[in-house]
Amino acid sequence: MEAIIDSGSLHRTAKYFMDSGRADTHDEAMALLKRFGLTVYVGEEIADSIHQQAALLTLINVARRTLLGGVQIVGLPDAPCLSPLATNVSMNQAVCDLGGQLVIDAKEDWPSAVIGNATVPSSNLLPCWRLTWNGWRGGVIPVRDGRRLREVEAIALAPLLAAGACVAEVFAYHAGDHLMAGRRTSGLSLWRPGVDWLIDDGTEVALAFLPSRLWIIGLGNLGQAFAWALAALPYSDRHEVQLVLQDFDRIAASNESTSLLTFAADIHRRKARVVAEWLDARGFDTYVNERRFGVSTRRGEDEPGVALCGVDNALARAALEKSRFGLVVEAGLGAGPEAFRSLSVHTFPSTRSAEEIWSRQVGQTNENNEHVENMPAYQALKRKGLDTCGLAQLASRTVGVPFVGLIAACLVLSEPLRRLNGGCAFELLSGSVVTLDDMESVAIPCGPYAFGHFRAGSVK
């Protein structure tokens, strides 16, 4: 007998199949996700490559929350973990801690991915993607194409971006909702979003400077992806990096399906404290603010002047420019079965104010909710005893997948990085993980970055 779920226990990716009518019950949607899996082949050189290790750890962390059948890893050597994404452990332990499965013989009915110089069995006729990156660019290429980027020099976000693009393609393949999944390249340039990411146009620069002080607003799907991406950056001394973490909410069971730093043991804990502990373990200097962000929030003169925002509340987003930040980089994700792969990034100040953009959405309800409530999965819950209020709350929750949040986080972090390193500033980036290389952008002039920085160093 199917248990009655609520908005706090709902798996946010299962909701995609419930809202679209492809699953008649929540259990049926979960059973579908449990058939989704991925095999990852890695080469011996991963033992000495911080970028390959970061790509693998990110791939596992993102994929295991959506591909509930599992993530298998073949060929991983027993080597120390060089990446700050996992601390004081071997790669084998780091992989297992994140939910990966070390195997010798891979499942034959799962698609696969390759990191480094690993060899994929020639008998594998299912899609296989190569994670590849260079400079400010990252993505995936079908292995049968025989191509890859140089993978010699890259900013730390590029391998993470490649991992996010890989999971997006694997999910689309399993879900059967994009015919080109497994047959095309998919990637993005963080230096010039919207251009061909496979081509080095000679304009990229080496990463020389990193931001020293940041305020993160919202610590759910997006905020935890911000923290994951931030930890990968090559700070010489993270104890000098000041981070203010603001979120008033507690972790619910549903958050584990979308948020990269959330595990079952964290349910009911404060989000800000969970994220602070994870960042503290990596040496950052964190400050926790557990008040709700809004018009009353005011930045002090000695606090970070740059805010990274990942909340989905229109009232809070409309107030972003009232808190005296010098720069705000804000991300939003799409909702519903048609738009959950969409993302946008706004920066302020810009030609349009935050209040102008979001004040019209304050208090609005999603007109699609009533349609969703009539889907078979919701009617099944109603027959099981879910009341009208619970049904409405469940319908109001958005479809969520961690790979969209990760890709959005890479775009958000790349904004201060570009500005610090002489690149272009954008007031708007908008697109979808379905067509990553077709990102729309609006560039703006900007002066020197005046909010604190360090020289980039070696990751320790």
Image: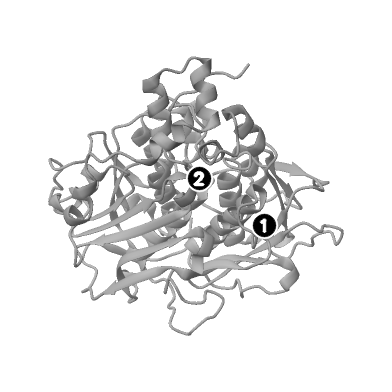
Q: Residue at x 44, y 48 (%)?
A: 225
Q: Residue 120: x, y in percent?
A: 79, 60
Q: Residue at x 53, y 45 (%)?
A: 87
Q: Indicate whether 459 appears above or below 370.
A: below
Marking on residue 47: 1
Is 169 left, or right, of 10 in this rendering?
right
Q: Indicate whether 452 appears above or below 197.
A: above
Badge 2 amino acid = Val
Q: Residue at x 19, y 49 (%)?
A: 359
Q: Residues within 10 Å of mark 1 (few under 14, many from 20)?
A: some
Pointer 1 or 2: first along the chain: 1
Q: Nearer the viewer, residue 259 or 317?
A: 317
Q: Nearer the viewer, residue 98 or 2?
A: 2
Q: Residue 322: x, y in percent?
A: 13, 50
Q: Do the numbered discs 1 and 2 sit on residues whose CB atoms are within 8 Å?
A: no
Label 2 sits on residue: 401
Examine the rendering and report whether any part of residue 428 can be seen. yes
Is 357 left, or right, of 383 in this rendering?
left
Farthest residue to the bottom: give it: 202
Q: Nearer the viewer, residue 216 or 280?
A: 216
Distance from the alpha carbon under mark 1 to that under mark 2: 30 Å
SS assignment at label 2: loop
